[in-house]
Image (cartoon, rainbow, N blue to C red):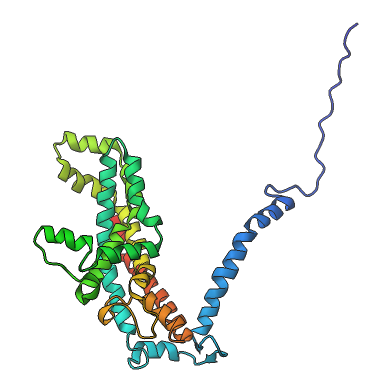
Amino acid sequence: MASPVLAERPAVTPRPGRRRRPGFGRSDRLVGWLLITPALVYFVVFLLYPAVAALYYSFTDWNLRTAPNWVGFANYAELLFNDVEFPHFWKSVQVTLQYTLIAVPLTLVSALAQALLINAIRRGSNTFRLLLFLPVVTAEAAVGAIWRWLYDPQYGLINAALGLVGIPKQNWLNTPELVIPALAFIAAWQCGISMIIYLAGLKGIPESIREAAIIDGAGPVQRFRKVVVPMLRPTTFYLVVTGTIAALQVFGLVYVIFSGGGGRSVTGGPEQSGLAYVLHIYLYAFRYDAMGAACAMSFMLLVLIMIVTALQFKFLKQEAS
């Protein structure tokens, strides 16, 4: 029996009406909002609201026990111009800037040296990478205790090593001229994150460029100067910007080393030589009952970081690109 021949169906003309626009449906948008709700709650409760509240309190006189008293720009004016009310404000700015100028370059040099060392190792590089990264994940309290012992003028290993080459013992944490270099050296020791970023930059340099330099007769020093350093300029620029921001906010290590004793006197080492800016904010907020002034100092630090970062982008970004 022959199969029936199916008649051709006439083309169906689409009915005019509202077309469904491509994109997510209502259920998809609902799922999206549910997924980002924890992040939004965290941002509003722990970041946005504290920032707005701190901005308000920076215009008040508040001691955390009584109601805040609105004083306008008095906190900012007294911090900048009243050396009697806030005698160590400019000292903390000076200490923080000096620390930044020493710690950031020293950290970059240490991180690049470690990255070059690991990049040159063929076997066991993961082990060395782990060992060099351990200082980053070590608690600040432990780091401070270890380095206080290492810097001990009588029994510290650093003075013992210096004594082997005939250098007299130094009282690192009690000599004003040596406090900032000692803190900067600790920062260079904790350069694991910068080391990993530099190592990624080294892995990204094309091998063909290295081979071309070798064919042209470039030695190791010339290859480092003419190939490695120029290719790492974007990485270096990123680390300079982020390292400067971190150095301007140094607190944990300085607090552990210099804020012992629990007294109400201004701490920060001999002659306040280790009085970092954020440590000063902490002291005014929780020891001197001046939360309004502490909030004002926080926003002044924000402005300083923005200015420094803008200058870095203006004068360093063109060289890095």
Which quarter of the figure has residue 315? bottom left
> Residue at image x 19%, y 38%?
213
Q: Is residue 321 visible?
A: no
| Residue 243 placement: quadrant | bottom left
Which residue is more in the foreground, 244 or 282?
A: 282
Quarter holding the N terminus is top right
Q: Which residue occupies 25% across, 60% down?
A: 106
Query: 205 or 38, which lies in front?
Result: 38
- Residue 122 in view in this figure: yes
Name the quarter where the C terminus is drawn.
bottom left
From this viewpoint, which residue is outermost toward the top? 1
Residue under the image location 81 percent in, 37 percent down: 13
- 196 shown above or below 43: above
Answer above or below: position of 242 versus 287: above
Query: Where residue 317 sits: x, y (%)?
Result: 32, 60
User: Whole-percent x and y of residue 157?
Assistant: 22, 60
Seen from this angle, which residue lies furthest left? Answer: 166
Where's residue 9, x and y in %? 84, 26
Residue 168 located left or right of residue 105:
left
Question: How far across and how far down the image is residue 99, in percent?
Answer: 28, 70
> In the displayed structure, would residue 172 be above or below residue 224?
below
